[in-house]
């Protein structure tokens, strides 16, 4: 066959790929036999955002002369050249900031153990919605169901758990998980996961600790510039072992035999990963095509969820001390007062004594440090969501399902914790009510008792009162 004539008849970039067929479904060298002018130009004169390993095309060279090794490209070439399947993919590889519209066509006859296919590609610098939507009915149905669930009014995490179960069913896998990554804090968290019945695999919560971020961070190198990692057999797993021996040992010791791993990225930001372990290898092509579109949608939703979460943090957190702000306290109090629950409530007012004197004598920076230390003392005793900075030097703690004895014990612990922070001295008032519906009564009583305690403190330490005006008792 005149391969050059074949590729020259194609109006877009095209090349002929040869795959060396080995025993037991394995393969050897994958070579670019020849290419038309558009394909050769994509190597020798690539766009600015497509860096090639070599800019000199040499016929019949291994494709890794030009690109880092890509298991997905090799798998597509193998299925087209050896298994004689026609394949199509529209993907965004991590190595290039472009979208590839790819077609793999089988060619005959084979030359002994050397099999051939034609690879045709079209480059888009922005995602083409029509290309993304050109999918089979089954895949379209699965993706549409995902979109519908994401628009539901249910809790976001519950919705994602339901989607995770659907993806696990689609893959026929033993386990499916969505892992979130915070690249600034270098932390990971499990958003949701789903297991098959009778699975002996452990929850990812068992593995995700402070050191796990480094493992997750290594996955981008394991994917090696492609858009995903699909490990269907021992041959593929051996490539994972070569690229990432630590993760290979971890996944195999945990019981993983096959894995599909997709990064969740949006607007250039890595949000996390989704994967399925011990999936049905016969469904690999369907799984890949479904994941490529589903992850595009999920990443967009996760980006919005993260932005909303960050906005909530900004709107509910006191930026100086890191505890909840007065706005969040008001919302919380309103919710408790309207709650049908008969849980008990305890309130603690803690007003920082001597802040005005510190500001006047040492400056606002010293005053800010004092406020931060006050918040640290409170955090030593109470959970972060229980502490509110009501304003200025005043903090409020609201506890539910607490006994009066527990409230007094925590008050004593706060006084002890304050001693660790030098000049942090609180005027404290507490109040207890047997029902959260009476939370505003508890707030009023705790406030009154705090001011009485503050008055006693300044009577004993008049030098600390410089510039202080008692807001309730002038």
Image: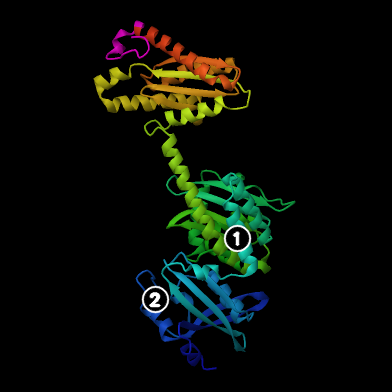
Q: Quadrant of residue 75?
A: bottom right
Residue at the disc numbered 1: 144
First in sequence, mark 1 or 2: give its number: 2
Determine the residue positioned at 51% across, 61% down: 222
Tell me residue 390's x, y (percent): 41, 25
Q: Which residues are magenta?
A: 459-474
238 relative position to 53: left or right: right
Mark 2 is surrounded, within 10 Å at the Cα level, by few (under 14), some (14 to 19) or many (20 or more) other residues, namely: few
The residues bearing labels 1 and 2 have C-alpha atoms spaced at a distance of 42 Å
- 461 in magenta: yes
Tell me residue 218's x, y (percent): 49, 56
Which quadrant of the figure contains the N terminus? bottom right
**What type of secondary structure mainly makes up the magenta span?**
loop
Mark 1 is surrounded, within 10 Å at the Cα level, by few (under 14), some (14 to 19) or many (20 or more) other residues, namely: few
| Nearest to the observer: residue 111 or residue 357 | 357
| Nearest to the observer: residue 142 or residue 468 | 142
Residue at the disc numbered 2: 54
């Amino acid at each position: 066959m005149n391969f050059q004539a074949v590729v020259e008849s194609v109006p877009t970039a095209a090349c002929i790929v040869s795959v060396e067929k080995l025993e037991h479904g394995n393969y050897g060298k994958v070579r670019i036999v020849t290419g038309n002018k558009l394909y050769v130009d994509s190597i020798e004169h690539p766009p600015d955002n497509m860096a090639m390993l070599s800019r000199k095309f040499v016929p019949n060279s291994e494709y890794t002369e030009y690109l880092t090794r890509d298991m997905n490209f090799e798998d597509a070439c193998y299925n087209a050249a050896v298994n004689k399947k026609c394949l199509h993919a529209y993907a965004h590889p991590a190595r290039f900031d472009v979208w590839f519209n790819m077609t793999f066509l089988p060619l005959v006859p084979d030359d002994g153990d050397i099999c051939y296919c034609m690879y045709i590609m079209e480059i888009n610098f922005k995602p083409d919605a029509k290309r993304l939507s050109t999918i089979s009915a089954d895949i379209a149905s699965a993706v549409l169901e995902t979109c519908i669930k994401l628009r539901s009014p249910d809790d976001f995490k519950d919705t994602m758990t339901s989607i995770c179960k659907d993806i696990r069913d689609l893959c026929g896998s033993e386990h499916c998980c969505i892992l979130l990554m915070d690249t600034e804090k270098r932390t990971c968290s499990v958003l949701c996961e789903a297991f098959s019945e009778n699975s002996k695999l452990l929850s990812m919560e068992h593995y995700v600790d402070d050191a796990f971020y480094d493992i997750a961070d290594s996955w981008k190198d394991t994917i090696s510039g492609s858009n995903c990692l699909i490990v269907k057999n021992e041959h593929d797993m051996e490539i994972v072992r070569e690229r990432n021996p630590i993760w290979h040992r971890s996944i195999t010791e945990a019981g993983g035999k096959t894995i599909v791993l997709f990064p969740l990225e949006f607007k250039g930001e890595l949000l996390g990963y989704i994967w399925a372990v011990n999936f049905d290898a016969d469904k690999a092509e369907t799984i890949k095509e479904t994941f490529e579109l589903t992850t595009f949608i999920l990443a967009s939703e996760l980006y919005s969820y993260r932005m909303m979460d960050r906005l909530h943090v900004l709107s509910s957190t006191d930026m100086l001390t890191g505890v909840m702000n007065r706005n969040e306290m008001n919302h919380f109090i309103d919710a408790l007062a309207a709650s049908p629950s008969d849980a008990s409530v305890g309130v603690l007012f803690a007003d920082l004594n001597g802040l005005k004197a510190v500001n006047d004598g040492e400056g606002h920076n010293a005053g800010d440090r004092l406020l931060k230390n006050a918040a640290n003392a409170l955090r030593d005793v109470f959970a972060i969501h229980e502490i509110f900075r009501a304003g200025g030097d005043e903090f409020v703690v609201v506890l539910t399902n607490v006994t009066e004895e527990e409230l007094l014990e925590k008050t004593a612990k706060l006084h002890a914790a304050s001693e660790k922070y030098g000049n942090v001295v609180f005027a404290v008032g507490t109040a207890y009510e047997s029902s959260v519906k009476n939370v505003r009564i508890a707030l009023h009583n705790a406030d009154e008792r705090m001011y009485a305690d503050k008055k006693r403190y300044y009577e004993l330490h008049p030098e600390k009162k410089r510039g202080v005006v008692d807001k309730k008792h002038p």
